[in-house]
Image (cartoon, rainbow, N blue to C red):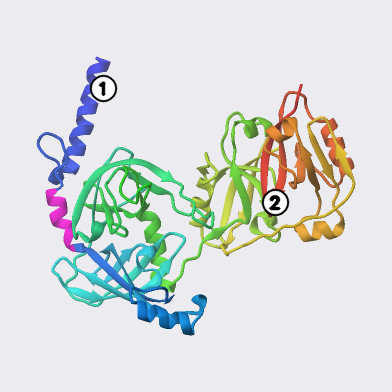
């Protein structure tokens, strides 16, 4: 009886899904994309840009001209020349006022932008606003009778769902490719080590020229913006990434209203919690974002966050991996109150603080001098004078002068600054020696080090 009821419920659920997507599902249950493409292609656009750049003149194919330059100009002083560079991408119209959404990298530093519609109209576009961190740009064209896409919800998107992309790979307009959602919430750090977009991963074939194009679900709704591929060759290799439409529209609304994007900011440096660190901090398993540095006068500092805290939830959202935290923090308005669940010294705490506004930050570091010490964990250290501490931008610590044994195995390097050992603040060589004496034998303990201006926790396993 139970099995029959289960089959009945499963059948009912399948029927509901088929009815919901009926226009786009074939009789055999496989998706039929033809009507979806016909209905949505007109709102997808091709975007071409031109950019003038000045380049240093080099050798040409004209020997006489090359001889002229060699006689009158040193090689590093050839007169510059102007060159035009062109790029292609995709986009889609989000409302009848002429707003077009695409990627930031498609229109970056462009001097002119052309938008070509499916009816072969070619329109000049202006940039309303752009955001490098999310790789989004909002354009506007002036025209009447514009087709628009229907926006869906990326939050409701499920792994395994069918999705479809329309774009202009390699300049082949209105190419259609399909696949499934492979994963959600993927973190892809930028060159600045920033990460504010929880990407949708798919196996939809995306290639150069698809950037900025829409990703549709079977209901014909846009759920993402095709942005990146993972490739060793520059072409599609089965892994593509799209910006969730929910995240994109939050950016769009700010760009439309003010021309720029404001993001939440805590003012902490975080790192992943691995198995050894989880054990050393008393966690039952690896999870959360470990705070390795709290910036001075930051919202985190004012709110009471401390180095060594492990953030396990932000505003009710569980943090399994450290890369998830910026996704949630960045979407909170500056000045809003946030609730953080943290683990501190093995105890659970709730911290409430006001979120600040994200700004570019940079840190620098440097050297110092003092007395030395060596110990049973294979680490020799020396003290730092006031001048060295000021140059490093820290208030306390000792410098590592040599490593061996378990210290070397933990990843500690000569030149590292030891700030904390087993959650004990290290203010001198004497304090360091005392902390070493009290280390629990056979256990993993956290070590907070500063290296090249950045703070990071390492797990050191104390010998038996």
The tag earlier along the polypeptide, 2 or 1, is 1
> Which residue is nearer to you in this view: 11 or 94?
94
**Residue bounds of the magenta highlight:** 34-42
Question: 250 and 195: which one is in front?
Answer: 195
Residue at position x 29%, y 75% in the image: 125
User: Of all residues shown, which one is farthest toward the left?
Assistant: 27
Magenta portion: prevailing SS class: helix
Residue 40 magenta: yes
- Mark 2 Cα-neighbour bin, 10 Å: few <14, some 14–19, many ≥20: few
Label placed on residue 304: 2
* Residue 62 belongs to the span the image colors magenta: no
Helix, strand or loop at label 1? It is: helix
In the rendered view of the protein, which quadrant contains the C terminus?
Answer: top right
Return the x and y of residue 386 as percentages of the image width and height: 86, 58
Numbered tag placed on residue 6 in the rendering: 1
Q: Quadrant of residue 53?
A: bottom left
Look at the image and tell me whether residue 405 can be seen: yes
312 or 367, which lies in front? 367
Residue 273 in percent (x, y) is at 59, 38
């Amino acid at each position: 009886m139970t099995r029959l009821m289960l089959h009945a419920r499963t059948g009912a659920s399948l029927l509901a899904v088929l009815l919901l997507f009926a226009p786009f599902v074939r009789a055999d249950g496989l998706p039929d994309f033809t009507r979806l493409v016909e209905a949505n292609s007109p709102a997808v656009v091709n975007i071409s840009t031109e950019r003038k750049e000045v380049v240093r003149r080099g050798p040409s194919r004209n020997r006489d001209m090359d001889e002229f330059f060699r006689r009158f100009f040193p090689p590093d002083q050839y007169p510059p020349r102007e060159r035009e560079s062109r790029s292609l991408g995709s986009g889609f119209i989000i409302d009848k006022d002429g707003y077009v959404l695409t990627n930031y990298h498609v229109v970056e530093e462009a001097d002119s932008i052309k938008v070509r519609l499916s009816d072969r109209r070619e329109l000049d576009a202006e940039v309303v606003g752009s955001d490098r961190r999310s790789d989004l740009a909002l354009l506007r064209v002036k025209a009447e009778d514009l087709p628009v896409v229907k926006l869906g919800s990326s939050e409701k998107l499920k792994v395994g769902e069918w999705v479809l992309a329309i774009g202009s790979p390699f300049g082949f307009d209105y190419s259609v490719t399909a696949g499934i959602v492979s994963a959600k919430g993927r973190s892809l750090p930028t060159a600045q080590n920033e990460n504010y977009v929880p990407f949708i991963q798919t196996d939809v074939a995306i290639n150069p020229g698809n950037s900025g194009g829409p990703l549709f679900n079977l209901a014909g709704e846009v759920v993402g913006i095709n942005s990146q591929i993972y490739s060793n060759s520059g072409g599609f290799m089965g892994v593509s990434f799209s910006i969730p439409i929910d995240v994109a529209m939050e950016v769009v609304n700010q760009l439309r209203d003010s021309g720029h994007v404001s993001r939440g900011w805590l003012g902490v440096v975080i790192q992943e919690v691995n198995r050894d660190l989880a054990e050393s901090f008393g966690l039952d398993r690896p999870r959360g974002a470990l705070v390795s540095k709290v910036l001075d006068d930051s919202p985190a500092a004012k709110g009471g966050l401390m180095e060594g805290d492990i953030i396990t939830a932000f505003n009710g959202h569980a943090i399994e991996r450290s890369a998830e935290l910026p996704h949630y923090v960045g979407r909170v308005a500056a000045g809003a109150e946030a609730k953080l669940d943290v683990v501190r010294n093995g105890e659970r705490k709730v911290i409430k603080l006001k979120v600040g506004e994200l700004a570019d930050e940079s840190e620098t570091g440097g050297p110092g001098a003092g007395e030395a010490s060596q110990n049973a964990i294979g680490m020799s250290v020396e003290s730092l004078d006031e001048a060295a501490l000021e140059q490093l931008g820290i208030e306390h610590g000792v410098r590592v002068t040599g490593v061996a044994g378990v210290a070397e195995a933990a990843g500690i390097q000569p030149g590292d600054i030891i700030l904390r050992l087993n959650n004990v603040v290290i203010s001198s060589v004497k304090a360091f020696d005392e902390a070493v004496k009290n280390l629990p034998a056979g256990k993993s303990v956290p070590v907070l080090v500063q290296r090249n201006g950045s703070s990071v926790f390492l797990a050191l396993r104390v010998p038996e």
